[in-house]
Amino acid sequence: MQKDHGGSASATYTGRLRHRKRSNEVPSDVGKANGGKLLVSDQNKYRSMLVRAYSSIWMIGGFAFIIYMGHLYIWAMVVVIQIFMARELFNLLRKAHEDSHLPGFRLLNWHFFFTAMLFVYGRILSQRLVNTVTLDKFLYKLVSGFVKYHMVTCYFLYIAGFMWFILTLKKKMYKYQFGQYAWTHMILIVVFTQSSFTVANIFEGIFWFLLPASLIVINDIAAYIFGFFFGRTPLIKLSPKKTWEGFIGASVTTIISAFVLANIMGRFQWLTCPRKDLSTGWLHCDPGPLFKSEYFTLPGWVPQWFPWREVLVLPVQWHALCLGLFASIIAPFGGFFASGFKRAFKIKDFGDSIPGHGGITDRMDCQMVMAVFAYIYHQSFVVPQSLSVEMILDQILMNLTFEEQRALYMKLGQIILDRQFGESS
């Protein structure tokens, strides 16, 4: 009898090691009790709302300050968010028992993460870095060398990680190790594929980052408020507290907000001008026709009692309606995907770093979907497709070295002189 008792205790201890309950995991009895509750009938909803509101105020305040600081600080914020997201996702499949037999295995995950970060941001920001140090010959040569050998450096860093992984393989741990290897690469694809579009939006003009991000926040808050007070009809089984009332109310609010916010943001050059380097100074540029006011004649179905026949709008406001439509109807499916993902792993949230909201990943699910759409929409429907002097100059500055730019200048000067002499003779 005593021998059996010892075996049972050993099995229990091993089970605890293999499946340590995370703080954000949902116990089965709690999940059954609260899984089908709507916010309108939740007894603890007011306390939850206060915690959520307090966290939201701090997040919005910090976000506004970083926007004021400029492009480089926003990029740094995106990097910090990526690190927190990767940490939460790495922890999702971590098993304490297996990790205890693989010292340094977690460090390998971060090696791949920072290698991917160097590759992605090196590709996006390399020429802007060159433009920043053009006047300093030593830094210019150093940065030019980094840009030239950037890809091969990242490749060999990855190969070093690959060899590291092979050399750390242990018998009876193969399945866990290869599972972690695949999981790490999936995280890199999810985190960096999406966020690279976010950073591209930032340097195209803060407007194209701030407006889509703000619309997701507005949609999330509006859905919560409408569902909180009026939610009666469940929307989707993956997320039982989401309601049709919250979805419809948030959609209308988001589309109206998109039209209004575009008019406000579009009047500040700090938000509309693209950044061609990595400096932090104030920007001045020609905002372009999208950000210049024009009169719009109201259609005939507008009631006669309405006092205006024409209204002053920015053309970019019509584009903002498309962003608002996507943010209210399509982007929430990123949240539904995350809800299904969490249910598959039987957890409530990806983390607990934001009181009332869960983890960073819980707040970024819809943002990532929106960032990709905003970039594709901007490149497809906003950036002029025909060549212009400004676009050609941008390509020259972004893709040619200083020596190549000087050679081009001399060649163009010679061509212009030859044409002038040809016309005069």
Image (tube, helix red, strand yellow):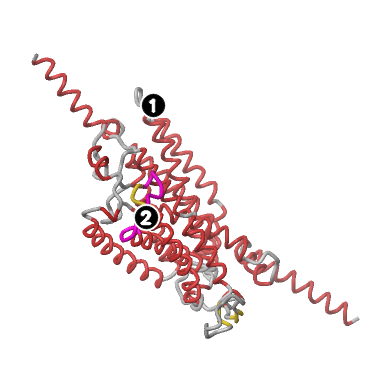
In the image, what residue occupies the spot 41% across and 34% down?
165
Q: Amino acid at mark 2?
A: Arg
Residue 143 placed where, x, y %? 52, 60
Q: Secondary structure at mark 2?
A: helix
Direction from residue 158 to residue 401 in the image, left or right: right
Q: Amino acid at mark 1?
A: Tyr
Residue 185 placed where, x, y %? 45, 40
Q: Secondary structure at mark 1?
A: helix
Of tags 2 and 1, the one toward the viewer is 2
Direction from residue 379 to residue 252 in the image, left or right: left
Q: Is residue 49 magenta?
A: no
Q: Nearer the viewer, residue 215 or 172?
A: 215
- Where's the C terminus, which quadrant? bottom right
> In 3D space, how far apart are the residues under numbered discs 2 and 1 (Cα atoms)?
34 Å
**Label located before the other in sequence (2 or 1):** 1
| Quarter where residue 44 is shown | bottom left
Q: Nearer the viewer, residue 140 or 338?
A: 338
In the image, what residue occupies the spot 56% across and 71% down?
316
- Where's the N terminus, which quadrant? top left
Residue on which disc 2 sits: 363
| Residue at the far left in the pictured view | 2
Residue on which disc 1 sits: 174
Span highlighted in magenta in the image: 227-239
